[in-house]
Each structure stands twice: as structure tokens, then as C-alpha cells.
Amino acid sequence: MDMLDQLRAFVATAQSGSFTAAAEQLGVSNRLTSKYVGELETQLGVRLFQRTTRRVGMTPAGEDLLARAPALLEELDDLLGDVSEGSRGFSGVIRVSAPVTFGESYIAPMLGRFAMQHPNLTFDMRLSDHYVDLASEGIDVAFRLGATDMLSIKTRKLGMIRSVVAASPAYLAKYGMPQSVAALSDHACIVDTNRRNARRWTFQNETKETAVTVAGRFHVNSARAACDLAVAGQGIVYSPHFAVVDALKSGALVPLFPDFTCEEIPLRAVYLEGRALPRKIRTLIDFSVQDIRSSQNAQS
């Protein structure tokens, strides 16, 4: 009998606690599930379950096998899927998480470009400025800005997102152009609380780094909202470039301090530790590396 069928029957029975529930999960008969498990026990020479009239309980040998078998089956399924996808193309669903403004501004268009190359794929994009739990939400890959401290995930750096400081012509006409970065402390600044050090704005030129602590009436947790407030003349904004690029192009915002560069934020693809990464996810991540590079070259 096929060892894979035996292992699948064992894992389903161990996780569900009964042959009946395992049979329903696998789409086979109760009798066949029990038969697969019995044959696996015979082949291994050990008992994996203690059977009662109502429930099956695992033996120590069964617990040892359950600790490793699900990951083995998942890796094998991914391998077979990779081989199959290599001949007929990718299919199925990719579940993606990203911050709201960055997801709307970049990830959604990027997925559209990727989808054109893979017409059999379906995408479930979930936008949130909170770090979602990849395992509980069933997320395949998350795109995250800034540092990531969790140990249970793997990351791949995709690039750096540059920041820019800007204000509207109306604001500058009313309050004047700040003559130095230190002068920002005397201006109304719009604080994006998504940033790790929201009120500490840093600037770098050829000789040194300068940091200034700012204040203002508006504290918001959205780069897009911060941009809109700046366009409305409510203050100076320090923002990721993707959130203000359209306003800069239209002249609704004017960049300040051209001799300085602002903070750069790392962009990473994040996925779960301890699992084989499906080929379609690897391909999406590889595509995003090239896509963001092309996008940044076009903007520079």
C-alpha cells in the first residue's frame, strides 16, 4: 500500500482523534482509513494508537511520528506542486498582506503586473497597518516596511523606500520656507505615527546626520492622510516617497532641503519560518524585487 496514503491517514486520525472524522476529512471510508493506519503500524513494527470504542489515543511512537509527519507531507505536496506548476503554470490562491497606503499605491499595481504573466492565479490581498499573524490569517507572504523583530518568520529584503519632506505652496507662502532642518521645530509638522520614531526626523548630507524633534497639531497613522493634510496647507510632512509622489508631480507639494536626504525605510517580504516556500510564492517575491527596482529607477 502507498506509504503516502498511510501517512495521510495517520496524520488525519491523530489530529481529529477518530477514524470517522479522519475518513470524512480525506474523503474515503472509515474502514479504509483504519486499514491504512493498520498497515502503517505493521510496516513500522509499532503501535501508533491505543484504540477504544469511542476514541483513539496516541502511543509515544505515534506522538514521535506526528511531530514530523505533517511537515514532511507538506514539503512533499509543495515539491509535487512545483513540478506540476513547472509544466502547466501556476494556479490557486496567493494570500498577501501589506500596509494600507503602500498596498494601495504599490502592491496592488505590482500584483496586477504579476497576474498578467500568470492568468490562472487568484489573489487575496488584505491591507492593514497592523502586523497580522501570518499563521492564523493564512497569509502566504506579507510586504512590510521597517524593522521586523519576530523570530518565527523569514524575511527577504526587497529594497529601500526613500522618504521626503515637503509642504504646500500655500503653507510656505503663509509661514515661510524653513531656512534649516533645525528650524522645523518652529513649524507645524504633521506626525505620521506609523513611523517608529514618529517625531524624530533625520536628515543626512555629505558631512553629517542631523535629527530634529518636531511637533504639530496633527498626529495620524496614515501616510496618505498625512499627505492630504499637507496638501491642504496644515503643515510640513515627512513621508515615504510613494505616498506623496503624485502631489510632488502636480506641484501640490514642494520638496524641501534638496541638499539633504531623508530616512530610507527597508521593504521586506515576510513569510513563515519552518515551511518550504511554494514556487509560486518564490516567483512572486523575485518578481517584486525587479518590479520595485524598475519603479524606483523610473521615479529617479
Image (cartoon, helix red, strand yellow):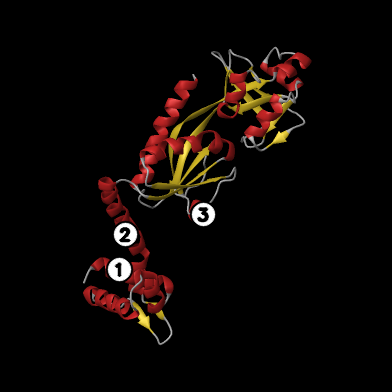
Callout 3 crowding tier (Cα within 10 Å): few <14, some 14–19, many ≥20:
few
Q: Position of residue 99 (x, y in %)?
A: 56, 40
* Label 3: which secondary element: helix
Residue 194 rendering spot, x and y as whole percentages: 63, 37
Above or below residue 238? Residue 112 is below
Indicate whether 142 appears above or below 234: below
Judged by depth in the image, the label closer to the viewer, 2 or 3, is 3
User: Do labels 3 and 1 touch, CB within 8 Å?
Assistant: no
Q: Three-letter amino acid code at disc 2?
A: Leu
Residue 7's tag is: 1
Looking at the picture, does residue 238 appear above or below residue 268? above
Q: In the picture, which quadrant includes the N terminus? A: bottom left
Label 3 to label 1, Cα distance in Å?
A: 27 Å
Which tag, 1 or 2, sits closer to the chain's start?
1
Q: In the image, is 248 to the left or to the right of 185? A: left
Residue 227 appears anywhere in the view: yes
Question: Which residue is under mark 2?
Answer: 72
Residue corresponding to mark 3: 137
Residue 44 falls in image quadrant: bottom left
Find out whether the residues at labels 1 and 2 contact each other: C-beta distance under 8 Å: yes
